[in-house]
Image (cartoon, rainbow, N blue to C red):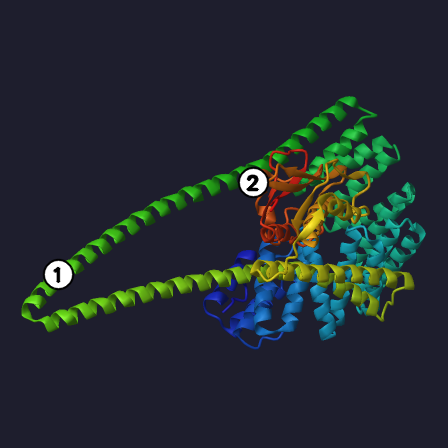
Amino acid sequence: MLSVGMAASADTVEDRYWQLQREFSYETAGLLLKQLETEGITKCQDLDIRDEEQAQGVVDAAMSDYYFGKDNKKSLAYTEKALEAGRKCENERLVEVALCQKSSLYVEMGEYDKSMEAAVEALTLAEKLRDIEMQTFCNIILAKLYSYNNNPDVASKCLEKALVTARSDYDRADCYGMIGEVLSYKGKYEEALRSIQKAVDIAQKAGDEENVMHHIWQKAMVFAAQRRYDEAEAEYRRIIPFYEKNDETKYLARVYSDLCDMYIEKENYAGAVSYGEMALHLWKKVGDRYQTMQCFQSLSKAYRWTNLKNAYVYRLKYDSLKELIYSDKQNDLLVKYETAEKERVIEKQQSEIYEQITDRQSKMKMFGVLATVLILAIVLFFAVRSAKINQRHATQLKLERDEATAARAEAERARDDAVKANKLKEVFIDNVVHELRTPINAIQGFNQLLTDQTCPPSPDESMEYMRYITENCNKLIKLVQDTLDVSLMESGNYPVSIASMSVKDVCLATLKKFSDSVKPGVKLQVADGEDFAVMSDRLLVERLIANYLSNACKYTSEGSITLAFSKMGNISWQVSVTDTGTGIAPENADKVFNCYEKLGSYVPGNGIGLALVRVIVKLLHGHAYMDTGYTDGCRFVARFDSK
């Protein structure tokens, strides 16, 4: 039982959590939730506890909320456990809460792509459950993410939806405040100020003084963006007493930092120095080295026009602290390297021990085999002497034993082959799912925007969304077609049509298709060469060259892309594509020809193009490779036998 006078500290909560893990009871779960409620954790109190796994998931969600802002890594670990429990028990409400927590955590940790993914999934589930409160929360999160990604138009639409579903004064005020920030990004300052003033009025009416101060801060930043410095300072001075009274050191330090930067912009360097020194004192008190470093930089700028000595001193402090922060990062990397090196040594020692044990076992097996042979020889010796019938029985027994050993070995080989095939299947499925998910998610997202009745798109927006849907449908079709072609070619069932063709004509016809695909400033050309005819499949050769050119266009932003062809005596001929792009490390020269292998995560493509090249040259009895001797970009070559 939880004692009445127990303090709600992190250690106490952690101890209670692990007690719950050791021996589960609904009473323990309820007591832990009550204890967390004293810390202000109320998000999970309305979740149903119907069995042990769901109850444990609810407690994990509460623990995640408890550690939010205190230890985000630990909070994320509890969130993942709650999400896993919710999915396993098919408790959609628990999954919804865990996804919202996950999205908020990734925002705090600066991982906006992961936050976006979790928020979209949470919004879909909230709409399914008709959870208005969570719909509002998800739309506000998405608005912040789109704002961070410099996409204010989509952020505005999310906020409009959030404003429709907002039920609490806090959510409505938050929506109007965010709308003001988005309008400020667009340069519509007066509209921004009116929207933020609505947020202030709503928060004042609700008696939420902390939220009022937050929105007044937003007004001050808009005034500063307009260079209306006196009005901005007046708003800042309204919020300073609140943060001083409530001992909000971090927020007070941010206010002073904002004022310091604003005074530098208005060239009031004495005021900038005053606020900068106060901000520096508070950042040191908080222990935030990064903000302290930024404060040193601001003070160096402020003192530049009043006291060059102090400006130089603060510049030195800025450089020293910056170097120290970088050094700490380097030390962290060094610690990780040393840890990895120790693990490697331990792994090597374990491997040596395993080899010794394996050697001993082999010797014991050999001894056992020799002993068995000796015993069989003795038995056979006496069997021959005693009777021929016993000899036949012994011979038959040996044959049956050999057959059983062979059958067992065959069964083990079949099992190993099945395991290997299953792993290959899993890798293939994972890769295909990964490559299918991106266009499907895009199609689904723009389709939702098209069918959204709460905020229908304009005709121009509809056409733009339809264009994106069509592009991703084409990507999906190409991915499926390329995957099927690779499979068909590897199986040997792909029809090959051999006929005489002009290599130069094929190169020029293929190059013409890519005239609009190169980036501005990149020259697309065919190297001069004497034309010659070969016996090959024209369509397959065009497809091979097209895949080489497509790869070069993606990774070349300046310089040139050159398609060349040549005859290598009377034995073979080749085509090559040379670019001046980003290049590929020599150790990855063979790896890039694998299916779904992409060395550039942010470059469009499905990772099948070069894999398809390798399959095509195999059908045409050729050889494809990357020329590692070329270092100004990439050069891919396909060489064929003249026959």
Q: Position of residue 79 (x, y in %)?
A: 60, 61
Of 93 and 195, which appears nearest the observer?
93
* Relative horizontal placement of residue 576, taking residue 32 as reference (left or right): right
* Relative horizontal placement of residue 349, taking residue 198 as reference (left or right): left
Q: Position of residue 237 (x, y in %)?
A: 84, 45
Q: Where is mark 2, residue-wise?
A: 587
Do the residues bearing badges 1 and 2 touch, measured as CB atoms within 8 Å?
Answer: no
- Inspect the image, locate mark 1, and give the three-letter code of the amino acid beneath it: Ala
Specify the farthest residue to the left. Answer: 385
Q: Secondary structure at mark 1?
A: helix
Of 197 and 320, which appears nearest the observer?
320
> Distance from label 1 to label 2 (Cα)?
57 Å
Mark 2, Cα crowd under 10 Å, few <14 / some 14-19 / many 20+, is: few
Specify the farthest residue to the right. Answer: 190
Residue 138 visible in the displayed image: yes
* Relative horizontal placement of residue 52, taking residue 269 as reference (left or right): left
> What residue is drawn where x is 85% and y is 56%?
153
Q: Which mark is residue 377?
A: 1
Specify the farthest residue to the top. Answer: 309
Q: Position of residue 291 (x, y in %)?
A: 70, 40
Of 373 and 619, which appears nearest the observer?
619
Q: Secondary structure at mark 2?
A: helix
* Relative horizontal placement of residue 245, taking residue 573 as reference (left or right): right
Of 490 and 258, which appears nearest the observer?
490
Q: How many labels were placed on the picture?
A: 2
Q: Quadrant of residue 524?
A: top right
Residue 603 visible in the displayed image: no
- Inspect the image, locate mark 2, and give the three-letter code of the amino acid beneath it: Glu
Q: Position of residue 113 (x, y in %)?
A: 70, 54
Q: Please identify, in this view, whether the residue under mark 1 or under mark 2 is nearer the observer.
A: 1
